[in-house]
Image (cartoon, grey):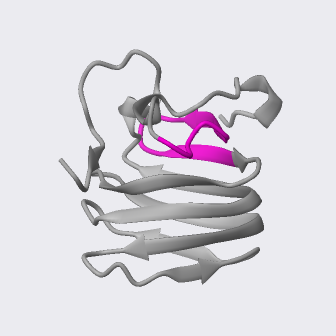
């Protein structure tokens, strides 16, 4: 049996683990999750930056509109992404993203990242400075 949804059914919100970090307030997400994978719609207005961090989940990001500058691994070399580009981040790999202006992307992770849900008490995302 399949299920059918529309993004509008899922509330748009900020990212809970980024609360209080600079340049993150205009990054908004909608999350749809199953038991084994999670998809997030990312919408950014006027740019934003997610600091370098890592998590257990493997991650794919597909840029749909706009541009992003990303870093992966220990190197801080920046890669520029635009519509149609796909960024693959292995499990526990240090990475960060800077959205340039307005941007839309889809992010797919497995396993789901429970720290993206409000009031989740166990930390699953670890920032580079920690």
Q: Nearer the viewer, residue 76 or 38?
A: 76
Q: Position of residue 114 (x, y in %)?
A: 38, 31
Quarter of the image holding residue 76?
bottom left
Q: Position of residue 119 (x, y in %)?
A: 40, 15
Q: Residue at x 69, y 67 (%)?
A: 63
Q: Residue at x 37, y 31 (%)?
A: 115
Residue 41 drawn in magenta: yes
Residue 12 drawn in magenta: no
Quarter of the image holding residue 122?
top left
Q: Which quarter of the rendered picture does the N terminus lie within? A: top right
Q: Position of residue 16 (x, y in %)?
A: 47, 28
Quarter of the image holding residue 121?
top left
Give the left or right position of residue 78, taking residue 104 as reference: left
Q: Nearer the viewer, residue 104 or 88?
A: 104
The range drawn in magenta is 22-42
Residue 25 vs 88, above or below: the answer is above
User: Furthest residue to the top?
Assistant: 119
Give the left or right position of residue 40, taking residue 82 as reference: left
User: Furthest residue to the front?
Assistant: 22
Q: Residue at x 76, y 74 (%)?
A: 83
Residue 97 vs 16, above or below: the answer is below
Q: Position of residue 107 (x, y in %)?
A: 57, 54
Q: Residue at x 30, y 43 (%)?
A: 125
Residue 67 vs 58, above or below: the answer is below
Give the left or right position of residue 119, taking residue 49 as reference: left
User: Furthest residue to the left?
Assistant: 130
Residue 1 vs 101, above or below: the answer is above
């Amino acid at each position: 049996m399949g299920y059918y949804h529309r993004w509008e059914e899922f509330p748009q919100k900020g990212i809970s683990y980024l609360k209080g970090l600079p340049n993150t307030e205009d990054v908004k997400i909608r999350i749809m999750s199953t038991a084994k994978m999670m998809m997030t719609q990312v919408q950014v207005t006027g740019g934003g930056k997610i600091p370098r961090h890592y998590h257990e989940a493997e991650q794919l990001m597909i840029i749909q509109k706009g541009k992003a500058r990303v870093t992966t691994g220990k190197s801080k070399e920046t890669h520029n992404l635009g519509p149609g580009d796909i960024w693959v981040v292995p499990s526990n790999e240090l990475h960060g993203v800077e959205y340039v202006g307005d941007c839309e992307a889809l992010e797919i992770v497995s396993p789901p990242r429970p720290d993206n849900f409000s009031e989740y008490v166990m930390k699953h995302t670890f920032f580079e400075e920690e």
